[in-house]
Amino acid sequence: MVALQHPYVIVAPAETVHVEAWPGTGRPVVLVPGLFGGAFTFRKVVPLLVAQGFRPIVIEPLGTGFSSRPEKADYSLNAQAVRLAAALDSLHVGPALVLAHSLGAAMAFRLALDRPDLVRGIVSIEGGPTEEATTPTFRSAMRYLPWVKLFGGIKLIRRKIRGMLLDASGDQSWVTDGIVLSYTVGEARNFDATLKAFLAMSRAREPVKLGPRLSAIACPVTLVVGTARHDGDVPPQEVAQMTHAIVSFEVDSERGAGHYLQEERPAAVVSALERLAQRVK
């Protein structure tokens, strides 16, 4: 499989996003990962998409994966959606199906609102209409940022991420030492920049709320969730909010799976995308 036609795209001064774009004439699918793991999190899904005739394009949001981590950038979800649009415009891609995980889905919803010409439909993997770029737990952890390097640095981050992945999974067998290392390769390349970007994310504020605008999303949306008890799930109130507000909205569930469905049930994720593709023909 040949990849990386356009590995990096400049979306603004000092802002570069890492892109993995597969060649071909298949129907484009834009994949947007969440906060950790970057393009690596979709390594099981991408070959399945290619086999079904799709053309995957993974875009790692600013501050994640191998994208740049400018300290003074705007890390709001709205700004990230603007960068997604800039990358797609640069690559001359759109309209496309969007497959987004967790926080990436909140960016995808904003992209669909602000640039409906780029989005034909969205499959959200465990991602709701999040209004903040980081969780309260993440922001609380940022208070101890000066101590991170002193008490373990990237090793400490990896221990925390390992615990997070385990707590977020239905089937924990996929979480190995090698996986944790791969999920944090981008963070380890420039650890100081990573910490500063995390701090900037924790301070980010959205210029406009997403919730009141959900009814303006014109494309179909499918939310895929795991039924196992796990951290990071979409709260019932957010599912109800999307059900009532988004005109064309469906929910798929995977029994026994957790937050990282692309890891535990990659075939189910691709099936959800195929069904969405049929709806927007």
Image: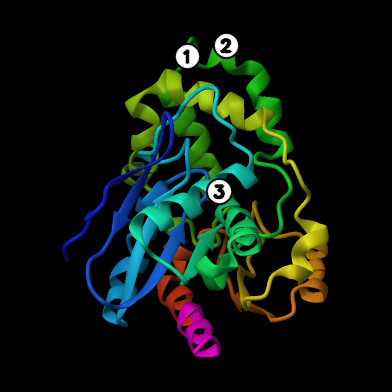
Residue at 16% over, 62% down: 2
Q: Are marks 1 and 2 in contact (CB under 8 Å)?
A: yes
Q: Is residue 116 left or right of residue 171?
A: right
Q: Amino acid at mark 3?
A: Val
Q: Who comes first in sequence, dot 2 or dot 3?
A: 3
Q: Which residue is mark 1?
A: 149
Q: Which mark is residue 158?
A: none
Q: Nearer the viewer, residue 35 or 168?
A: 35
Residue 177 pos. (x, y %): 35, 42
Q: Which mark is residue 82?
A: 3
**SS for tag 2?**
helix
Residue 10 pos. (x, y %): 37, 40
Residue at 67% over, 61% down: 229
Q: Is residue 89 left or right of residue 259?
A: left
Q: CA distance from mark 3 to mark 1?
A: 32 Å
Residue at 59% over, 53% down: 107
Residue 210 pos. (x, y %): 75, 55
Q: Which residue is mark 2?
A: 146
**SS for tag 1?**
loop
